[in-house]
Image (tube, grey):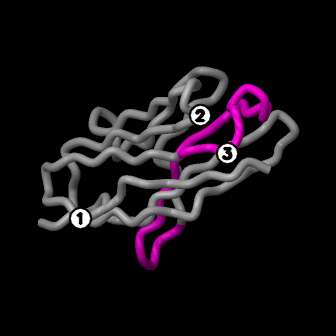
Amino acid sequence: QVQLVESGGGLVQAGGSLRLSCGASRSFFSSSINAMGWYRQAPGKQRELVADITSGSTNYADSVKGRFTISRDFGKNTLYLQMNSLKPEDTAVYYCYTDTRSGSRSWGQGTQVTVSS
């Protein structure tokens, strides 16, 4: 299983930006990872998919399209989520994940993002 460590969360005012990072303990290539992405969970709500990269294609939740950008750095084994024009409704704990070709999913520990109005 891949160990994932997130960072970059914090408190920001509405309209501001944050960049989340998710560092993997192993190479994306050697781990046979074929999908990775970010979920978030707000208090009292279900976890929802924010953005993912699957077989090289990126996908975004409608609520973040045009504001968030997912990317990865193979050299650093790190997944990123650039979040711009943040809104109070983006407040949540953000989790990164990876999926291998064998169907194994790994999760990060989560990082809190709080957007004040």
Q: Quick check: 1 left or right of 54?
A: right
Q: Cβ–Cβ below 8 Å for labels 3 and 2?
A: yes
Query: Which residue is label 2 attached to?
Result: 77
Q: Secondary structure at mark 3?
A: loop
Does 7 appear in magenta? no
Q: Foreground residue, 93 or 29?
A: 29
Name the mark on residue 25.
3
Choose the circle earlier in sequence order: 1 or 3: 1
Residue at the image point whose x is 16% and y is 67% from the top: 116
Magenta span covers which residues? 23-46
Quadrant into which the C terminus falls: bottom left
Residue at the location (75% across, 50% down)? Answer: 105
In the displayed structure image, the side of residue 9 where residue 97 appears, left or right: right
On the image, numbered disc 1 is attached to which residue?
Answer: 11
Which residue type does callout 2 highlight?
A: Asn
In 3D space, how far apart are the residues under numbered discs 3 and 2 (Cα atoms)? 8 Å
Q: As drawn, is 39 to the left or to the right of 67?
A: right
Q: Which residue corresponds to the image point at 57% horizontal and 64% vertical from the top-left?
A: 109
Amino acid type for the residue under numbered disc 3: Ser
Q: Earlier in the sequence, mark 3 or mark 2?
A: 3
